[in-house]
């Protein structure tokens, strides 16, 4: 019913998180009507494709030379304190509090109890390798900075068990963030308190 170019693009856009087929079509018709936005989008996606790299250590996307992001390559960041977060945006939320001097590990997703494979794709092998390369081969502290939602709690419990040999102390932030709330939407002050109240 739609021309192929629209149909194909709609299928791709509908693969993006929280976007359904109808919404995808609405976006495409908007882009067809608005040449400026369309051209900018094409140009900026090309630029993203050319410039963005994923940090070898923490998986944060970055631009610039080398294999490490600006946080991992910063000598004043504490390498043996690692905050585990669900997603990239959470790193930026925590950075905005200006109160964390350690480094990060981005899981990319939480455990989905209905998907057995979701346990194996949390990049924990990479985390272990990285910790074993530290001078003491163990982290001083791993902070589980995951939202207190149902899936977040399940993931946190799994990580606590799985990572207990990788750190002298495993803590979790959460106090101050309402149950069911997400780190992404917590304001800087709340997040700052949650970070200093970790246990
Ligand atoms: Zn990094």
Image (cartoon, grey):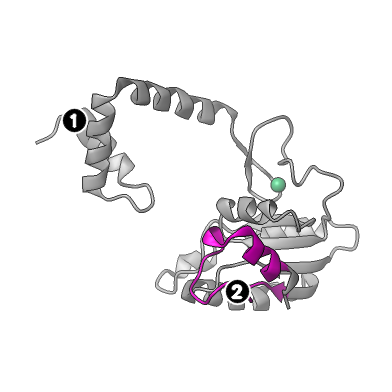
Judging depth in this view, the residue of 177 and 46 nearest the camera is 177
At a point 66% along the width and 72% down the height, the residue shown is 173
Residue located beneath label 1 in the image: 4
Mark positioned earlier in the residue sequence (2 or 1): 1
At a point 63% along the width and 46% down the height, the residue shown is 60
Helix, strand or loop at label 2? It is helix
Q: Position of residue 139 (x, y in %)?
A: 82, 65
Spatial separation of the CA atoms under disc 2 and disc 1: 44 Å
Check the image and report above or below for 184 versus 14: below
At a point 63% along the width and 66% down the height, the residue shown is 190
Q: Is mark 2 within 8 Å of ligand 1?
A: no
Q: Which mark is residue 174?
A: none
Picture quarter containing residue 174?
bottom right
Q: Which mark is residue 156?
A: 2
> Which residue is the extreme one toward the right?
135
Q: Position of residue 62 (x, y in %)?
A: 64, 38
Instruction: Confirm whether residue 121 shows in the render.
Output: no
Quarter of the picture holding the C terminus = bottom right
Quarter of the picture holding the N terminus = top left
Disc 2 vs disc 1: which is toward the camera? Answer: 2
Is residue 6 found left or right of 64 in the rendered image? left
Check the image and report above or below for 93 versus 117: above
At a point 32% along the width and 41% down the height, the residue shown is 13
Q: Say if mark 2 contacts mark 1, CB within 8 Å.
A: no
Find out whether residue 175 is within the magenta segment: yes
Which range is magenta? 171-195
Judging depth in this view, the residue of 135 and 83 nearest the camera is 83
Is residue 95 found left or right of 11 in the rendered image? right
Helix, strand or loop at label 1? It is helix
Judging depth in this view, the residue of 68 and 116 nearest the camera is 68
């Amino acid at each position: 019913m739609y021309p192929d170019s629209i149909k194909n693009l709609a299928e791709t856009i509908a693969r993006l998180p929280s976007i359904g087929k109808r919404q995808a079509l609405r976006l495409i018709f908007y882009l067809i009507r608005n040449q400026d936005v369309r051209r900018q989008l094409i140009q900026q996606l090309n630029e993203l494709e050319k410039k963005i790299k994923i940090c070898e250590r923490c998986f944060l996307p970055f631009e610039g030379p080398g294999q490490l992001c600006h946080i991992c390559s910063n000598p004043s960041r504490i390498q043996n304190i690692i905050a585990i977060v669900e997603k990239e945006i959470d790193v930026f939320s925590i950075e905005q509090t200006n109160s964390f001097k350690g480094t990060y590990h981005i899981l990319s997703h939480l455990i989905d109890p209905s998907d057995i494979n979701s346990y194996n794709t949390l990049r924990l092998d990479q985390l272990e390798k990285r910790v074993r390369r530290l001078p003491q081969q163990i982290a001083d502290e791993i902070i589980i900075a995951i939202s207190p939602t149902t899936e977040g709690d399940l993931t946190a419990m799994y990580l606590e068990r799985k990572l207990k040999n990788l750190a002298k102390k495993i803590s979790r932030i959460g106090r101050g963030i309402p149950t069911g709330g997400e780190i992404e939407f917590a304001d800087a002050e709340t997040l700052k308190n949650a970070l200093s109240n970790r246990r």
